[in-house]
Amino acid sequence: MSCDTENIDDTTLMPVFDCPDLEANYGDDCIIATGVVGIVNQACECESTVVEYDCPDLQANIGDDCSTATTPGVVDESCECDTDITYDCPELGGNIGDACQNPAGPGTIYDDCDCESTTYDCPNLGANVGDHCVTATGWEGTVTEDCECISDLVDCPDAGLNIGDPCQTILIPNGTINADCECEAVAVDCPDLGLNIGDACQNPAGGGGIYDACGGESKYYE
């Protein structure tokens, strides 16, 4: 067999398609059976890109909002805009208490059928006085007239304690939560120790005893 160029057959390179039956790749344009242009999907099917509606003439589905020249309505099963719907406020196409939109933003439909902007007693919290809330430390609480979220469970949510509860800080080894939710030192016989004379203690050997002086002297017993 000769390898001369004169003996080499002509070679035709065939393109490789994602979808050989369609001779197309994913995302290519195609024509579906109804003659509408579509796109080749991952299943190698020609998929229509046209949005299909229950009511093509209205470009809407049954139950969608619609309107005539003067009145709002809802698309019915006959693909007509049914305006025979009873609303508290027909001109707004809504009922009292429904959400609505006015030029200033979102609002609520009130008894006078006005769409009034939604306002809160405490805009920074997005809540009204008396509403349920959660404190920064995770305690459930109630919004106060000062627009603060105060825990319903403890007097002092930041500390997680009630007034009168014992407390400790680096400087106050023995204290009590006061009315200002601060840890206030409790008067003791021996402030440096945070103990009173007569308090229980333990000797170096592990035996029990009681303090009988603030100088660290103790009366031990077995």
Image (cartoon, rainbow, N blue to C red):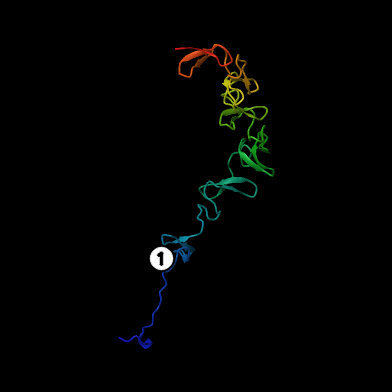
Q: How many marks?
A: 1
Q: Is residue 138 above or below residue 85?
A: above
Q: Is residue 107 above or below residue 130?
A: below
* Quarter the N terminus occupies: bottom left
Q: Quadrant of residue 41?
A: bottom left
At x 41%, y 76%, the residue is 13
Q: Is residue 45 above or below residue 136?
A: below
Question: Where does the image place residue 214, in percent across and percent down from the top left?
Answer: 59, 15
Q: Which residue occupies the foreground of this view, 1 or 50?
A: 1
Seen from this angle, which residue lies furthest right? 104
Label 1 belongs to which residue?
19
Question: Which kind of residue does numbered mark 1 sit on?
Answer: Cys
Question: Where does the image place residue 112, in percent across and percent down from the top left?
Answer: 68, 35
Seen from this angle, which residue lies furthest left? 1
Residue 91 in view (yes/no): no
Question: Where does the image place residue 37, in percent across and percent down from the top left?
Answer: 49, 64
Q: Quadrant of residue 99?
A: top right
Q: Quadrant of residue 192?
A: top right
Q: Callout 1: few (<14), some (14-19), or many (20+) C-alpha neighbours within 10 Å? A: some
* Quarter the C terminus occupies: top left
Residue 14 in view (yes/no): yes
Q: Secondary structure at mark 1?
A: loop
Question: Where does the image place residue 21, in percent across and percent down from the top left?
Answer: 39, 67
Q: Horizontal placement of 122 versus 212: left or right?
A: right
Q: Which residue occupies the foreground of this view, 104 or 207?
A: 207
